Amino acid sequence: MKKTLIALAALASISAFAQTAAPAATGVTVYGLIDISYMKDSSAGAPYSDGLLFNDRNSTSKIGLKGSTDAGSGFKANFNLEAGHILISAKPATEALFNRQAWAGLSSEKFGEVRAGTQDSVAFQANAGFDLNGAANDSQAAALSGVPTTGNGGKTLAQYITPAFGGFKAQLGYQPKGDNVALLTGADATLAKAAYAVAFSYAAGPLAAAVSYESAASDNATLTTSLGNTWSGVSASYDFTVAKLVATYANGGTNFKGYNLGLAVPVAGASIGVQYSKNTDTNGTGVELFANKEVLKNTTAYVDYGKKHVDTGATAGDYDVYSLGLIWTF
C-alpha cells in the first residue's frame, strides 16, 4: 500500500509539472482503471474455492501517464508510462514501477511510428482485440484451454508501425538477446537469442483481420516453455451490428496450439457473449460466458464464468471460475 501511495503521488506530481511547465506544447494525460470484484475458483483451492473479495479478476488495475509533443517537421515525440499491481500487496523488489508500459518514440502521419522500451508484444497488439471479453484475467476461454491466442513474445522491444493504408497496417518488432536471457529461465535462458515479430492487420467497416508471427526466443530444442517456441496466429472478426463473431487460430508449438471462437450480442445496452477454445494437442478446452454493461459514467459492471477441462494427467477434470465486479476507468 505504501508503494502504491508513493506511485500515485509521483504520477500526480509529474502530471502537474508537465501541465504547468509546457501546457501549449505538450499534452500529458493521467489515466487508469480500477477493477474491484468477487471471485470463486474450484481449481485453486482455499481460499478461492470458498469465494474471495479480490481485484483484477476481469481487467488489470493500472495507472499511467501518456503524452505527445510536437517535435517539428511533421513529427511527434510520444511516451507511455504505466504501472500495474496497484491494488495488491507491495511489488516484488525486482519489479519496476512502470512494469506494464515504459516506452518512448517518434511518429508522423507520413512515416508511421517507432517505439522502444517496455510495451505490449506485437502479437498482443494485433490480436487482443479479437477476444470479445478483453482477454479476461480469470475466465478467458483461450487461457483456460492453454492456447496462446495473443502470442508468446516478451514486452521489451523496439517496434515500427506503418501508417494505415486503406485499412491495412504492418508492425515489426525486435527483441535483443539480452532481454530474452532475462525473460527466460533454465535451459531456455542459456540458449536465448534475439527474436523478431511481424503482424499485418486490416480493419475497415465491420471486418477486421490479423496475421502475426513471432520467432523463438531460445534455441532450446526441448521447448520447455511456450516462450521457447515460434508462434503464429491468424484472427478475424465481423460485426453484424446485431451480433459480432470472432475466430482465432494460434500455433505456439507443441501443446500450445488450437483455436478460439466467440459470439457477442448487444442486449439493452449490455454486451452478452460466449467463447469456446480448444487445445488441439492436449484436448483441453475452455468455455467462457460473460456479460458487461456501463451502469454509471465510466463505470462498468461485469459477470464472468469460465469452465476449464483438463483431458489427461493428475489434474484431469473440469474446473469452474466465477467472478463479478465493477470496473472504473478514468
Image (cartoon, rainbow, N blue to C red):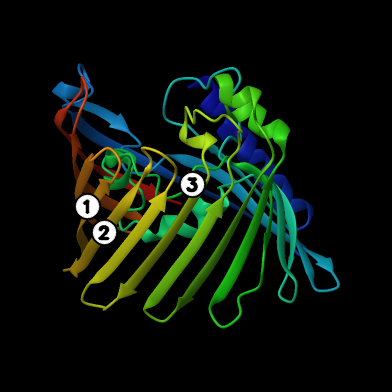
Q: Residues within 10 Å of mark 2 (few under 14, many from 20)?
A: many
Q: Nearer the viewer, residue 44 or 199?
A: 199
Q: Furthest-right residue in view? A: 73
The residue positioned 31% from the left and 37% from the top of the image is: 57
- Picture disc at residue 276: 1
Callout 1–callout 2 Cβ contact below 8 Å = yes
Question: For numbered disc 1, what is the local secondary structure?
Answer: strand
- Picture disc at residue 261: 2
Q: Amino acid at mark 2?
A: Leu
Is 121 situated above or below 203? above
Callout 3–callout 2 Cβ contact below 8 Å = no
Q: Residues within 10 Å of mark 3 (few under 14, many from 20)?
A: some
Is 303 situated above or below 249? above
Q: CA distance from mark 3 to mark 2?
A: 30 Å
Relative image position of residue 295 (x, y in whole percent): 24, 57
- Picture disc at residue 32: 3
